[in-house]
Image (cartoon, rainbow, N blue to C red):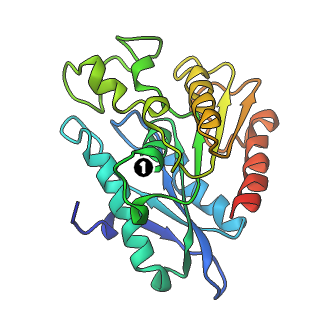
Amino acid sequence: MDFDVAPLLTPYPCPGGDPAPGVVVLPGGGYTHLAGHEGKPVAEWLNSLGYAAFVLEYPVGPDDIHPLPLNTARAALRHLRANAAHNRIDPRRLGVLGFSAGGHLAAHVATAPETSPDARPDFAVLVYPASSWGSIEPFGPGTPPRDTLLGPEPTRAQRDAVSIELIATEDTPPVLAIHAADDFVIPVRHSLLLTETLARLRVPVELHVLSRGGHGFGLGEDDPEVHRWTALCADWLRRYT
């Protein structure tokens, strides 16, 4: 998809002159809006770890259905790699970090078989991702009352085609998944299914299930039990970037 994605990216450069690893941040919001607490604060936290961050305002809303969000994420990764010197990032260490629906999008751009190498991230962090679209109502447990990704009356085949555990391939980059056991909006089953698939494909994958946190906790700064996911993530990022 050819369009100017630059205005949709809010950059948070990493201090210093050397090329840094880069992360595209994808806030959640059920593909209806973008959650502010999963954007700028996350980018600033990544800065503190030595990563350049770019919050992507991917299209959401009733007319912005699949494949527009996926193609926007692909275009963002291509744009950042093509302009790596300007953004002071290492194009070989460019990943995605997504929450909820943004976690689905992060997983989608990392796994979709037809994604070209220049549009695929080098790593993916998924926080309470809605990764199994076939597990969302009316086909299974989940809460979105209507399908905001696929439009009106999607078929089971259409849902399966965007369910990450069903489309992932061996080309998927390393993945870290974070989920809370008491998440009743997007149940932990989503991350369990995805982890099982990636493990079978021999893709490096790590899953951390928090004992509590529910859904939408972002950085979880108000609860030490929840906030510890950021330390787990920082350690994982150091190992894989």
Residue type at mark 1 is Val
Extreme residue in the bottom direction: 17
Question: From what the image shows, is residue 237 above or below residue 203?
Answer: below
Q: Which residue occupies 76% across, 59% down?
A: 239
Question: Position of 118 compared to 209: left or right?
Answer: left
Residue 72 drawn at (x, y percent): 31, 55
Question: From what the image shows, is residue 37 above or below residue 100?
Answer: below
> How many callouts does the rendering have?
1
Instruction: Give the quarter of the figure containing the N terminus.
Output: bottom left
Question: From what the image shows, is residue 38 above or below residue 215?
Answer: below
Question: Within 10 Å of the Cα at label 1, are there few (<14), some (14-19), or many (20+) other Cα atoms?
Answer: many
Question: Position of 212 compared to 5: left or right?
Answer: right
Q: Which residue occupies 37% across, 53% down?
A: 115
Residue 90 drawn at (x, y percent): 57, 76
Residue 144 drawn at (x, y percent): 39, 21
Question: From what the image shows, is residue 168 above or below residue 41?
Answer: above
Residue 48: image quadrant is bottom right
**In the image shown, does 24 or 154 lie closer to the viewer?**
154
**In the image shown, does 120 or 18 lie closer to the viewer?**
120
Q: Which residue in the protein does label 1 denote?
A: 109
Residue 73 drawn at (x, y percent): 37, 55
Residue 182: image quadrant is top right
Instruction: Give the quarter of the figure containing the C terminus.
Output: bottom right
Question: Position of 109 compared to 64: left or right?
Answer: right
Q: Which residue occupies 34% across, 50% down?
A: 114
Q: Which residue occupies 21% across, 65% down?
A: 2
Secondary element at image label 1 = helix
Residue 30: image quadrant is top left
